[in-house]
């Protein structure tokens, strides 16, 4: 079987992982980093996002990770008018899928 990083090159692209503080979220972040993506690591609390960033940075010190607090269960939290401008710039700068 071919390694995912050999099949998918996400260099220069940005991915957003919600729920990144959970086990599956952390694994998704690691897989996207392995494929070369910049990853916005989001969770409902900064402590969860920071824990995932620390775990991934132990494995890949050069990983390009951006922390973000996003409660995807709240309409107000995901509204463009209330989202963090830093997070919006990070996501807009290098989309995962071409426009």
Image (cartoon, rainbow, N blue to C red):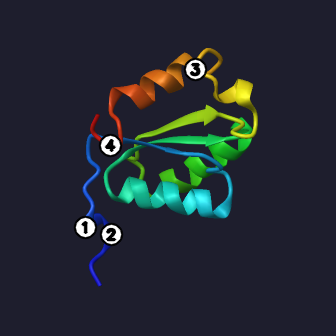
Q: Position of residue 34 (x, y in %)?
A: 36, 59
Q: Left or right: where does residue 61 sit relative to residue 67?
A: left
Give the residue pinned by disc 4: 97
Q: Please name which of the two marks, 2 or 3, marks the residue nearer to the observer.
A: 3
Work out how far the residue at label 4 is from the one at label 2, CA to CA, in angstroms. Answer: 17 Å
Residue in front for this viewpoint, 88 or 54: 88
Q: Residues within 10 Å of mark 3 (few under 14, many from 20)?
A: few
Q: Quadrant of residue 72?
A: top right
Residue in front for this viewpoint, 64 or 95: 95
Say which residue appears at 25% left-offset and 67% top-offset: 7
For label 3, the SS is loop
For label 4, the SS is loop
- Dot 3 or dot 1: first in sequence order is 1
Q: Please name which of the two marks, 3 or 1, marks the residue nearer to the observer.
A: 3
Work out how far the residue at label 2 is from the one at label 3, CA to CA, in angstroms. Answer: 32 Å
- Dot 4 or dot 1: first in sequence order is 1
Give the residue pinned by disc 1: 7
Give the residue pinned by disc 2: 4
For label 1, the SS is helix
Work out how far the residue at label 4 is from the one at label 1, CA to CA, in angstroms. Answer: 16 Å
- Dot 2 or dot 3: first in sequence order is 2
3, above or below 34, in the image: below
84, above or below 37, in the image: above
Q: Residues within 10 Å of mark 2 (few under 14, many from 20)?
A: few
Give the residue pinned by disc 3: 80
Q: Position of residue 40 (x, y in %)?
A: 50, 39
Residue in front for this viewpoint, 99 or 38: 99
Quarter the C terminus occupies: top left
Q: Position of residue 92 (x, y in %)?
A: 39, 26
């Amino acid at each position: 079987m071919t390694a995912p990083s050999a099949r998918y090159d996400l260099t220069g692209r940005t991915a957003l992982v919600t729920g990144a503080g959970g086990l599956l979220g952390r694994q998704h972040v690691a897989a996207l980093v392995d494929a070369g993506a910049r990853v916005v690591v989001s969770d409902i609390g900064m402590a969860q996002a920071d824990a995932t960033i620390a775990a991934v940075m132990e494995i890949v010190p050069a990983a390009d990770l951006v922390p973000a607090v996003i409660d995807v269960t709240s309409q107000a939290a995901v509204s463009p008018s209330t989202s963090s401008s830093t997070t919006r710039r990070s996501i807009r700068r290098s989309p995962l899928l071409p426009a």
